[in-house]
Image: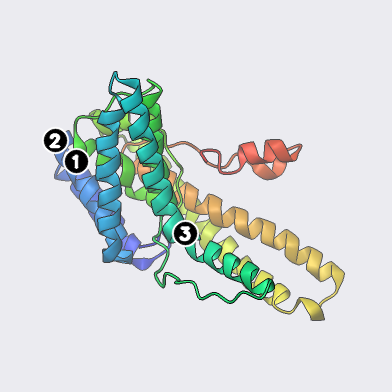
Amino acid sequence: MLFNSFEFLLFLPIVFCLYWFVFNKSLRWQNILILAASYFFYGWWSKKFLALLALSTLLDYSYGFWVASPNKKKAKLFLWLSIINNLGILGVFKYYNFFATQVQTAFESIGIHTNPTLLHVALPIGISFYTFHGMSYVFDIYRGHQKPVSNFIDYAVFVSFFPLLVAGPIERANHLLPQVQKKRTFRYVQSVEGLRLILWGMFKKVVIADSLAVTVDSIFNNYQEVNGITLIFGAIAFSFQIYCDFSGYSDIALGTAKIFGFELLSNFKFPYFSRDIAEFWRRWHVSL
């Protein structure tokens, strides 16, 4: 399910009403609802990858206890297992085909013909975000910045909170987990601000980014036939398209979290007003 889909426009108010008007008396049931909604949200895109999300969550939840061991050698061993597990999952699904084809090309350039086995599966949406969430949680425990979470539901919400699954931001455990664990009350001002962010994000994504995409694609799909000024215009339009695409999704995520009583990190801080490249990257996808 994507933020700019009709299904999401039905899904969000239903979860909102259940969250604040049915389960508002119990933090435990609010978190269970958020977790169930997050898995429904993710499973709407592909049910087969729900097991991967659940497995990744369970493994890092367990690693969190093991890296908290006073035995430093044991703690470091499980820290490395967490790193290998998370980067392994990410590498297989996101980068395996790329590297396999690059190796094939390199061998063929020297006359050696290979036939690597490629994975013919879609890239799981949000895999980068939930693997980095889990890995950062284990790192924070190892460094002494975070204690292991005893309640599995709380940890699972931290990893799979649906506003974060599609485009981040990547939250640190010491910022999001306390919000998951404390009682949340409905605040009208916060909900209005959240709705404003959702609408602004939708405007940036649907009206600006998607409209610019048509122009940008028409220019760069026929770049041989257009003049230099048109190419420069296309490059400028693309810079606005990609910014509004990413920051629009980020605003929708922040706004959606707000209406459920959560405050997430702002991911884009006017990067095009930066004075140099270093400052630009500090303002672009801040949580990465």
Earlier residue among tags 2 and 3: 2
Quarter-wise, where is residue 161 in the image? top left
Q: Which residue is mark 2?
A: 26
Amino acid at circle 2 = Ser
- In contact (CB < 8 Å): disc 2 and disc 1: yes
Q: Residue at x 54, y 53 (%)?
A: 246
Q: Secondary structure at mark 1?
A: helix
The foreground one among 78 and 203 is 78
Indicate the quadrant containing the N terminus: top left, top right, bottom left or bottom right: bottom left
Tell me if I can see residue 174 in this picture. Answer: no
276 horizontally vs 97: left or right: right
Badge nearest the viewer, 2 or 3: 3
Q: Residue at x 31, y 66 (%)?
A: 46
Q: Which mark is residue 30?
A: 1
Q: Which residue is mark 3?
A: 94
Pinpoint residue 265: horizontal percent, then vertical percent.
47, 36
Amino acid at circle 3 = Lys
Q: Residue at x 81, y 81 (%)?
A: 225
Q: Secondary structure at mark 3?
A: helix
Amino acid at circle 1 = Gln
* C-alpha distance separating marks 2 and 1: 6 Å
The foreground one among 153 and 22 is 153
Crowd tier of the residue under label 3, counting other residues whose Cα lies within 10 Å: few below 14, some 14–19, many 20 or above? some
Earlier residue among tags 1 and 3: 1
Pinpoint residue 159: horizontal percent, then vertical percent.
32, 43
Q: Residue at x 66, y 42 (%)?
A: 271
